[in-house]
Image (cartoon, rainbow, N blue to C red):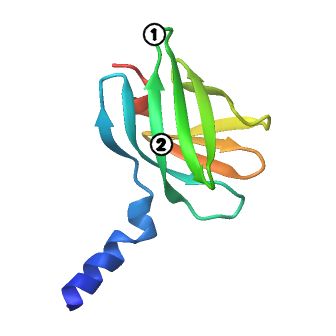
Amino acid sequence: MLRLAIAIALLSSPALAQTSTLAGTDGTNSLGTVPCAANAGDPLQSCNAELRHHDDGTTTLAVALGGGEVRSIYFNDGIPSSSSSPAKITYETRGDLTVIFIDPGEVYEIPTAALIRQ
């Protein structure tokens, strides 16, 4: 019983929730999760996401924020260019991650390699 309690605690750990996953892909679109925070000061959590690569070289990341809200982030050649929010979008590269910021406090992390169409 103690082992089960420890396993459940580890599975619900915020550290594990901060890893991107790919649950399925068809070679163009990918389903999974990305670490995200919808409000300034919120800890990163695991958010359901879909990554869609388009024939024109652009990419769209759709992230479920909860409450039925979805944030779409648009990329050109792997660089975040805009979003479905009218707020300012910026990004930085941290190792192999692209970290996206949308004012006033949204944060999204995605592996940079996932943004490049294979």
At label 2, counting other C-alpha atoms closer than 10 Å, the crowd grade (few under 14, some 14-19, many 20 or more) is many
Q: Amino acid at mark 2?
A: Ala
Q: Taking the image as drawn, is residue 62 in sight?
A: yes
Q: Residue at x 46, y 26 (%)?
A: 52
User: Tag 1's secondary structure?
Assistant: loop
Using residue 31 as the reference point, say whether residue 62 is left or right of it: right
Q: Is residue 112 above or below residue 19?
A: above
Name the quadrant of the N terminus. Answer: bottom left
Q: Which mark is residue 71?
A: none
Q: Residue 1, relative to residue 38: is it above or below?
A: below
* Position of the C terminus by quadrant: top left
Question: Farthest residue in the front direction?
Answer: 68
Kindly identify the residue that appears in the image at 30 percent across and 38 percent down: 24
- For label 2, the residue is 49
Q: Earlier in the sequence, mark 2 or mark 1?
A: 2
State the image coordinates of residue 112 (x, y, percent, origin top left). 45, 33
Between the residue at mark 2 and the residue at mark 1, the CA separation in whole angstroms equals 20 Å
Q: Residue at x 38, y 63 (%)?
A: 16
Label 1 is placed on what type of residue? Asp
Q: Judge whether 50 appears above or below 59 on screen.
A: below
Which residue is labeled 1 in the image?
Answer: 55
Along the line of sight, which residue is nearer the eye, 14 or 84? 84
Q: Secondary structure at mark 2?
A: strand
- Does 103 sit left or right of 14 as displayed? right
Res. 111 in view: no
56 or 19: which is nearer to us?
Answer: 56
